[in-house]
Amino acid sequence: MNHRDYIDFLNMIEKLKCNTRHSWTSSGRQESVAEHSWRLAVMAMLCADEYPTLDINKVIKMCLVHDFGEAITGDIPAFLKNEADEENEEVAIRSLISFLPTTTKEELFVLFEEMKAMDTDEAKLYKSLDNMEALIAHNEADISTWIPREYEENLTYGQKNAEWSEWTKELRKVIRQDSMDKINGVGE
């Protein structure tokens, strides 16, 4: 990849630092899409020992690129996202990736297809952690930032995706307890 194309691509995905998510940080500002993806990748890295047979580098790549399309579309909270939004995000992803060199482009197209199919353990781990990162972020934020539906969402969201492994199932239980404690004002 030549230097100009490299910088141009970085300029395109820089919008992930600017586009905010529905989640708020513990300091009281809206979280960026890039911050979510970064912490999601850290989560994958930190649980590598729990999954010695998985390709954790692939999972980390999934975590880093999963929201590339949001550089164009912006973030739409999961509870509002519909099929048309999913299609728009996929078109945005394909558009962005088309600027990359052939080898990288092909690798990312395959990676996105794997993530979409959810047939591999790597894709299942990425998706489960993606759901749980959002919940952890909500639990870190002041409860005044929660909208009414989030009281239930934080107790149920991502449960199905966490069921694929004992480790993620247990992590989801701990996060759920943190949500219940927050809702009930425990520790304040």
Image: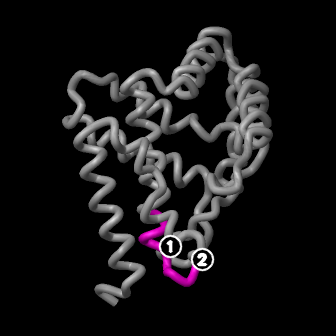
For label 1, the SS is helix
Instruction: State the residue at coordinates (50%, 32%).
Output: 62
Residue topped by disc 2: 148
Question: What span is colored magenta in the figure?
Answer: 137-145
Specify the farthest residue to the bottom.
188
Determine contact: label 1, label 2, CB under 8 Å: yes
Where residue 44 appears, as percent x and y from the top left, is 36, 40
Instruction: State the residue at coordinates (30%, 24%).
Output: 54
Amino acid of disc 1: Tyr
Q: Is residue 114 left or right of residue 169?
A: right
- Marking on residue 151: 1
For label 2, the SS is loop
Instruction: State the residue at coordinates (62%, 12%).
Output: 106
- Is residue 1 or residue 75 the one in the foreground? 75
Instruction: State the residue at coordinates (37%, 87%).
Output: 185
Note whether 8 is above or below 130 in the view shown.
above
